[in-house]
Amino acid sequence: MLPPIHDSKLVGYEVDGREQRLSLTIEPASGARDAFRLSVEGYVAHFFPAPMLPAIIQGIYPVDAVQLVRDAWPLIEAGHADCGWPGPWAHSLETAAAFLAAGDYRGFRIESSYGLSGWVLGQSLTGRE
């Protein structure tokens, strides 16, 4: 079970391409606990259009990865044409959908009232003290 994050501060994030992990460092709203990390394991892509930190997190919500990619396809298509982002699996919408379905990927939408919002594609979301 993940710790509660509503109104907590997202103070940092780190992407490790070798380990395929995106980690979020969060300071709890209550102040009763020390900072903790949430990690998206099996990470393949993220999009944070205005990554201002610290951010006040409203929540992190699982969403269907294929639907997320369909909704963001114009952005992904332009990124792929420009520099290959988010990866060779995004050559077309069809190949992206097949890749995500075959790898059991999930989308995670990050919403904040202030600061960083966006999405992450990966296989799981885990919490660590």
Image (spheres, rainbow, N blue to C red):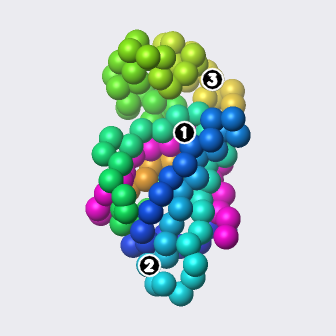
Image location of residue 38, percent across then percent down: 59, 59
Where is residue 46 shown, x and y percent of the image? 48, 38
Q: Position of residue 9 (x, y in %)?
A: 42, 68
Mark 2 secondary-structure assignment: loop
In the picture shown, does residue 80 fall above or below 122? above
Task: From the top left corner, tell me how far across and down residue 27 is, in percent.
Answer: 49, 72
Let me know if residue 61 is in the magenta part: no
Q: Is residue 81 among the parts visible in the rendering?
A: yes
User: Disc 3 marks which amino acid?
Assistant: Phe
Instruction: Tell me where the magenta segment starts and ends, as one range.
Output: 112-129
Q: Nearer the viewer, residue 122 or 54?
A: 54
Q: Quadrant of residue 89?
A: top right
- State the predominant SS element of the stretch in magenta: strand
Circle nearer the viewer, 1 or 3: 1
Of the residues tagged 3 and 2, which is closer to the observer? 2
Q: Which residue is mark 1?
A: 121
- Numbered badge on residue 99: 3
Q: What kind of residue is marked 1?
A: Leu
- Residue that lies at the very extreme toward the bottom in this rendered image: 32
- Determine whether 69 is above or below 4 in the image: above
The earlier-in-sequence mark between 1 and 2 is: 2
* Residue identifier under label 2: 29
Q: Residues within 10 Å of mark 3 (few under 14, many from 20)?
A: some
The dot on residue 13 is: none
Please tell me whether mark 1 sits on a helix, a strand or a loop: strand
Mark positioned earlier in the residue sequence (1 or 3): 3
Label 2 Cα neighbours within 10 Å, binned few <14 / some 14-19 / many ≥20: some
